[in-house]
Image (cartoon, helix red, strand yellow):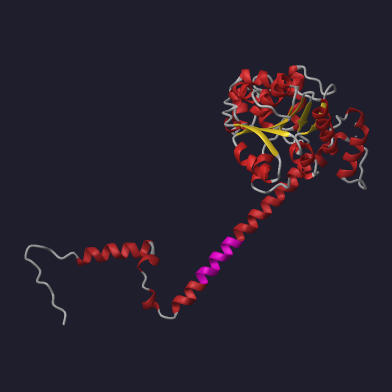
Amino acid sequence: MRIRTPRKKGKPRKRKKQIGRKRRLTHASPKIIMNPAELGEAVPEAAHEAETEGTRAETGQLAGFMEGYAKGYQEGKYAGGEEIIDQLLPPNIIFPDLSLQQIIATGVSMHMEQAIPLMLPEQVRDAILHAMEEKRPLSVVRLGDGELLTMAQEIVMPVDQVRREGKFLEYAGVKVPDLDIRNRLVEAVNGADIVGIPRTRMPNYQLLVSPVFQAFGLSLREKQWTDSLINYSLCTAGCLLPILQNRRILLIGNMAEQLSAVLDHRGLFVAGIVTPVNGARDAARVVALAKQYEFDIALVSAGIAAVLITEELARLTGKVAIDFGHLANALIKGEAPL
């Protein structure tokens, strides 16, 4: 039996007001107050219809996205290749039987005299081995987008653009603007024996090399060049282990201790470790510490600072120094075979 609590006098009942609120809520969002048990068999059918409509909507959105993506890709591909050919051809000539690749290949062959040769991994390996045997200095540095953007400050690009396009630079060891580090990088590149430059023609990679070099009067004809990924190429080509065997190895960088364990496990001799490296402005201190060790070859993994350290260390000690980069991380993680 249900016992009703007596209503106190002078206190009006609020049932109608509550119903009014409930009705407004029901009208606004019926799913919140519906009780599925009261709807019986209509619930699965309604749910199925709702789910089907939702799936159709999602499928439609995905199809629309993919269609837009494909259209944008085709337009970008045309603008980046075929449209350029359209603009260069006289109005009374077409090449319907030639593909974009064929036309580009022909153009590349006509400009081979202007090509800059890059040393292959085996050639870099031989240069390193000969330098160690002859006990003469050799520095191998590498330029990526970080180094090139740093060198571009206020002479190729305004600082704001460098900061915007190089948001990673502080992680790599340079806080923009830093014109002192810019100038020291230029000196290090000019003094290095082998310089790795990017093969990819993406913005801020190979396409930034010529403007930067021209701005500082650096020649692309009077130095030995290689791929900026030469560190990885030496490893994948099986050239790294012959370089390091029976040599005193100096490791420099924030991953030096972990890399030392990997090399020690392979029976290689680590003569010393210099860690940490706190950005490009820490390069001089690191070089001073590294000079205290007896070594044959130094592997430097220190971001942009590696270019400064590698060139100066080789020049001052008469030894071989290599900008080792993130290959250290790959070896530590087992992602690259030694």
Residue in the image at 69% along x and 40% along y: 327
Is residue 216 positioned above or below 301 on the image?
Answer: above
On the image, the x and y values in percent for residue 121 come to: 82, 38
How many tags in the picture?
0
**Left or right of residue 118: residue 276:** left
User: Quadrant of residue 210 in the image?
Assistant: top right
Q: Residue furthest bottom?
A: 1
**Quarter placement of the N terminus:** bottom left
Does the magenta segment cover residue 227?
A: no
On the image, the x and y values in percent for residue 28 come to: 37, 61
Residue 91, can we see it? Answer: no
Is residue 199 positioned above or below 310 on the image?
Answer: below
| The magenta segment | 49-59
Task: From the viewer's side, name the closer residue of 193 and 304.
Answer: 193
User: Quadrant of residue 272 in the image?
Assistant: top right
Task: From the viewer's side, name the closer residue of 309 and 260.
Answer: 260
Does the magenta segment cover residue 54?
A: yes
Task: From the viewer's side, name the closer residue of 290 and 184.
Answer: 290
Q: Main secondary structure of the magenta part?
A: helix
Task: From the viewer's side, name the closer residue of 49 and 154.
Answer: 154
Residue 309, can we see it? Answer: yes
**Quarter placement of the C terminus:** top right
Residue in the image at 64% along x and 54% along y: 65
On the image, the x and y values in percent for residue 221 come to: 85, 23
On the image, the x and y values in percent for residue 208 come to: 73, 28
User: Quadrant of residue 26 in the image?
Assistant: bottom left
Q: Residue furthest left?
A: 9
